């Protein structure tokens, strides 16, 4: 018999927090009084994360473990969890406990009222630097300005999605996945639940600045081609200015006695225009690189093993 709820929990090097994550999730789900499963996805952890979760599988028939062959990343881990989740409703939450599982009952209540997606909206972010809060605020609003799909601001992957939404997203086979964007793209009836985002319970962040920038680029290139149109407009504008400047120099040379000086400014102009060209080429390269990833058609992730499904199959 399939559970009412599935909880998808991607984990990467979370040995300091994973036991507390399991304890709180189990407490919340048991308190909801309906059948559930906890689908942990070990994203190639190098510590004892997989071993600890395997122990949960042995002692608790509601726990599942999907082990990757290596570290594929956060989005592939979420994809795997959603692929294997069997519940009528699927919760998505990170293992670091910054998003409180105690919000689940409120999400479930809205789901039972007919909402297909209930996403967590952060009304306050504790333990984050001013730079991270500021950059996140800019990022969400920039994405909405550049995309045709409206993405809810100040949200992450923390949410509940209905079975039909999960199935719809699972049918989208793109490689550079931006899950929260895909969930918005498929539509359905959506609503927000506000909550306070806490500091990490233990361990360190798995999203340093480098990964955040790569994540932002995935989001931008997956849902908008407006940057390419902007590059075209900018290139045309710079070319027009250069042409006007060339006419001005030609006029000086033919009709005035003004000595043409200012090699530094000329070189500066050349460097500026070349910089614009390289920026546009780099932007085009980002899109072409993602096209290349798509046509290779490699799997998003590879499983080494899955644990806890034997008990589920016997129960069915």
Image (tube, rainbow, N blue to C red):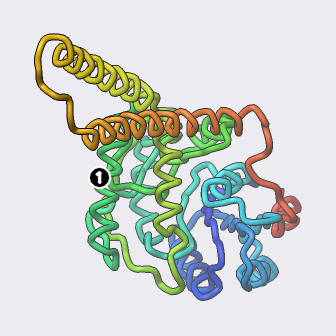
Query: x, y (%) of residue 132?
Result: 34, 67
Frontmost residue, 43 versus 51:
43
Frontmost residue, 226 versus 115:
226
The total of numbered circles placed on residues is 1
Q: Is residue 56 left or right of residue 204?
A: right
Q: Is residue 294 left or right of residue 251?
A: right
Categorize mark 1 by other alpha carbons within 10 Å: few (<14), some (14-19), many (20+): few
Name the residue at 54% across, 46% down.
178
Location of residue 53 with respect to 189 vertically, above or below: below
Which quadrant: the C terminus?
bottom right
Query: x, y (%) of residue 77?
Result: 67, 59
Location of residue 85 with respect to 12 vertically, above or below: above
Frontmost residue, 282 versus 157:
282
Location of residue 111 with respect to 98 vertically, above or below: above
Give the quadrant of residue 265. top left
Query: x, y (%) of residue 95?
Result: 57, 73
Frontmost residue, 259 versus 116:
259
Name the residue at 59% across, 63% down.
34
Give the quadrant of residue 241. top left
Q: Which secondary structure, mark 1?
A: helix
Q: Is residue 66 left or right of residue 214?
A: right
**Residue under label 1:** 138
Q: Is residue 259 left or right of residue 305?
A: left
Name the residue at 46% across, 64% down.
104
Query: x, y (%) of residue 90?
Result: 58, 54
Which quadrant: the N terminus?
bottom right
User: Furthest-top residue in view?
Assistant: 255
Location of residue 193 with respect to 257 vertically, above or below: below
Name the residue at 54% across, 85% down.
203
């Amino acid at each position: 018999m399939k559970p009412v709820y599935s909880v998808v929990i991607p984990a990467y090097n979370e040995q300091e927090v994973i036991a507390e994550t399991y304890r709180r999730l189990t407490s919340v789900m048991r308190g909801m009084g309906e059948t559930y499963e906890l689908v942990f996805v070990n994203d190639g952890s190098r510590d004892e994360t997989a071993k600890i979760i395997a122990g949960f599988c042995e002692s608790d028939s509601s726990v599942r473990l999907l082990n990757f062959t290596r570290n594929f990343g956060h989005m592939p881990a979420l994809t795997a969890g959603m692929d294997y989740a069997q519940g009528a409703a699927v919760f998505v939450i990170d293992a670091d406990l910054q998003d409180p599982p105690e919000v689940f009952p409120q999400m479930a209540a809205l789901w039972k009222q007919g909402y297909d997606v209930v996403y967590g909206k952060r009304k306050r972010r504790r333990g984050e630097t001013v730079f991270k809060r500021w950059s996140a605020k800019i990022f969400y609003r920039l994405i909405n300005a550049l995309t045709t799909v409206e993405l809810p601001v100040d949200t992450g992957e923390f949410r509940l999605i209905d079975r039909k939404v999960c199935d719809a997203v699972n049918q989208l086979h793109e490689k550079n996945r931006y899950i929260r964007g895909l969930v918005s793209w498929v539509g359905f009836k959506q609503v927000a639940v506000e909550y306070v985002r806490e500091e990490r319970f233990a361990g360190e962040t798995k999203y340093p600045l480098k990964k955040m920038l790569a994540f932002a680029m995935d989001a931008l290139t997956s849902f908008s081609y407006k940057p390419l149109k902007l590059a075209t407009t900018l290139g045309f504008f710079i070319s027009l200015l250069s042409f006007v400047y060339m006419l001005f120099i030609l006029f000086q040379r033919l009709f005035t006695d003004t000595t043409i000086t200012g090699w530094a400014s000329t070189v500066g102009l050349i460097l500026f225009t070349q910089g614009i060209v390289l920026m546009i080429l780099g932007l085009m390269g980002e899109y072409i690189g993602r096209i290349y990833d798509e046509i290779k058609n490699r799997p998003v992730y590879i499983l080494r093993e899955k644990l806890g499904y034997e008990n589920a199959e016997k129960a069915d």
